[in-house]
Amino acid sequence: MLRYITAILSCFAFFLHLPAQSDKPAYKPKSDTITVQSADTGHSVKKAVILSAIVPGTGQIYNRKWWKTPIIYAALSTSIYFALDQNQKFVRYKNAYIQRINGQPDEFSGQPDNWILTNLEIARRNRDLLFIASAGIYVLNIVDAAVDAHLFYFDVSDDLSIHIIPSVSYSLPHVSGLNWQCTFTLNFYRKNKKS
């Protein structure tokens, strides 16, 4: 037992004596700076976002995705049209209810008060949701322009590929058995900047 304790303590003392790092560097590099190639692509994300924020759809035109512009305008105009329609209904129901409270005849004289109040709240809720949808479409337009501008030079053609290469390698001579490997190679190509 004493031999084991002595062996453990001597190993521990040996590892405590080894220096972890020296003050002098073993290798001095020639330069401490890294040269980075300019990432200027000529296509500005900021410009696409600003254009889409000012006039919806112009960021998509700047990104050369012209087919998205009519979709954006159709979505915005449809949601705004129905929001304004619901606002007109809301105003009609509100005016009818105010006239009914004041004892004046209204355009819905055959309907009970609860019917007017229910339709008033439905028109208000629909109007608010449609204005929120319009704002969401506007923000989505800006996000889409930013994403398209970021991915402007990336190739999304059929040339994107994956190659699976199975291989067998033998291990070290003193270890028995085979090691199985499977190598995956992904090739992504970037479009060249147009001059």
Image: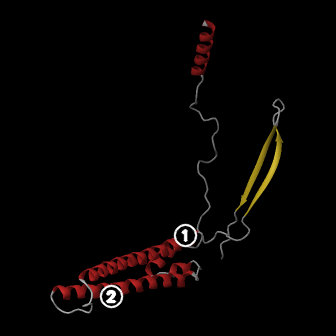
Give above or below for 190 relative to 2: below
Return the x and y of residue 73 as percentages of the image width and height.
49, 84
- Left or right: 42 in relation to 178: left
Mark 1 vs mark 2: which is more N-terminal?
A: 2
Which residue is disc 1 drawn over?
A: 147
Q: Secondary structure at mark 2?
A: helix
Give above or below for 155 relative to 169: below
Mark 1 and mark 2: Cα distance apart in space: 37 Å
Q: Secondary structure at mark 1?
A: helix
Near-viewer residue (31 or 80): 80
Return the x and y of residue 109 as percentages of the image width and height.
24, 91
Q: Residue at x 77, y 58 (%)?
A: 163
Count every numbered label the image shows and give the total.
Answer: 2
Of labels 1 and 2, the one closer to you: 2
- Left or right: 116 in relation to 143: left
Q: Residue at x 81, y 50 (%)?
A: 166
Return the x and y of residue 71 as percentages of the image width and height.
53, 82
Q: Residue at x 60, y 10 (%)?
A: 6
**Dividing the image into 4 quarters, which one contains the N terminus?**
top right
Categorize mark 1 by other alpha carbons within 10 Å: few (<14), some (14-19), many (20+): some
Residue type at numbered disc 2? Gln
Q: Residue at x 61, y 14 (%)?
A: 10
Q: Which mark is residue 88?
A: 2
Near-viewer residue (22 or 133): 133
- Left or right: 89 in relation to 136: left
- Please tell me in which quadrant of the rendered image residue 95 appears: bottom left
Most extreme residue toward the top, as rendered?
A: 2
Return the x and y of residue 176 as percentages of the image width and height.
83, 32
Residue type at numbered disc 1? Val
**Dividing the image into 4 quarters, which one contains the C terminus?**
bottom right
- Please tell me in which quadrant of the rendered image residue 94 appears: bottom left
